[in-house]
Amino acid sequence: MKILFLVIGKTDETYLDTGINKFIKRLEHYVPFEMKVIPDIKNRKTLSEEQQKKAEGDLILSQLAPGDDLILLDENGKTFSSVAFSQWIEKQMNAGGKRIIFVVGGPYGFSKDVYAKAKFKISLSEMTFSHQMIRLIFVEQLYRAFTIIKGEPYHHV
């Protein structure tokens, strides 16, 4: 199984980039992992929210291949403890899919087409985080999930 993490727009803050890259390097010891940045939509200030969601959604859906499982990081998704998330990840790995694609949407969320294609939605918290900060939080939690699966001491109960 491979994991692709899609995000809209580049990370502007150096400290976030540093943390994200730290956990991506750690993750690569457990699973083939790639974070791909979908460039911000040009002239987005002239677009309505719906037009922007549609344009971003089309770019997200263009990254999918047959057999991919699309998982949205969405405020209305299922919440997990770190241990439960690791169990969910392990179940997905054992299901034998080719690739899991996790996506952080743009500032207005996802288009109807993206929601229709999604297999699952995950919420990382009831709190709201910036789209850039959630990247670091997610890659850290994904790394934590793999250390839990492997029984390594990173996660303390």
Image (tube, rainbow, N blue to C red):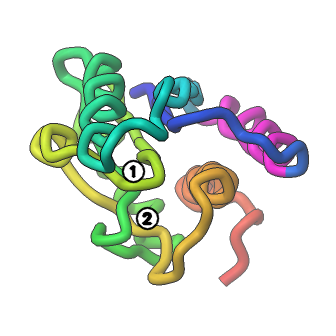
| Camera-side residue of 141 and 37 | 37
User: Residue 121: percent from the left, percent from the top?
Assistant: 28, 58
Q: Residues within 10 Å of mark 1 (few under 14, many from 20)?
A: some
- Give the labeled residue for mark 2: 85
Query: Residue 90 vs residue 153: left or right?
Result: left
Quarter location, residue 97: top left
Q: Amino acid at mark 1?
A: Glu
Q: Quadrant of the C terminus?
A: bottom right
Task: Please determine whether, in this image, residue 123 is positioned above or below residue 109.
Answer: below
Q: Nearer the viewer, mark 2 or mark 1?
A: 2
Query: Residue 126 vs residue 31: left or right?
Result: left
| Separation (CA) of disc 2 from disc 1 | 9 Å
Q: Residue at x 67, y 38 (%)?
A: 27
Give SS at disc 1. Answer: helix
Q: Residue at x 57, y 54 (%)?
A: 131
Query: Residue 23 vs residue 128: left or right?
Result: right
Q: Residues within 10 Å of mark 2 (few under 14, many from 20)?
A: some
| Camera-side residue of 13 and 65 | 13
Q: Residue at x 39, y 27 (%)?
A: 1
Q: Amino acid at mark 2?
A: Phe
User: Residue 109: percent from the left, percent from the top?
Assistant: 35, 54
Q: Which stretch appears magenta?
A: 16-30
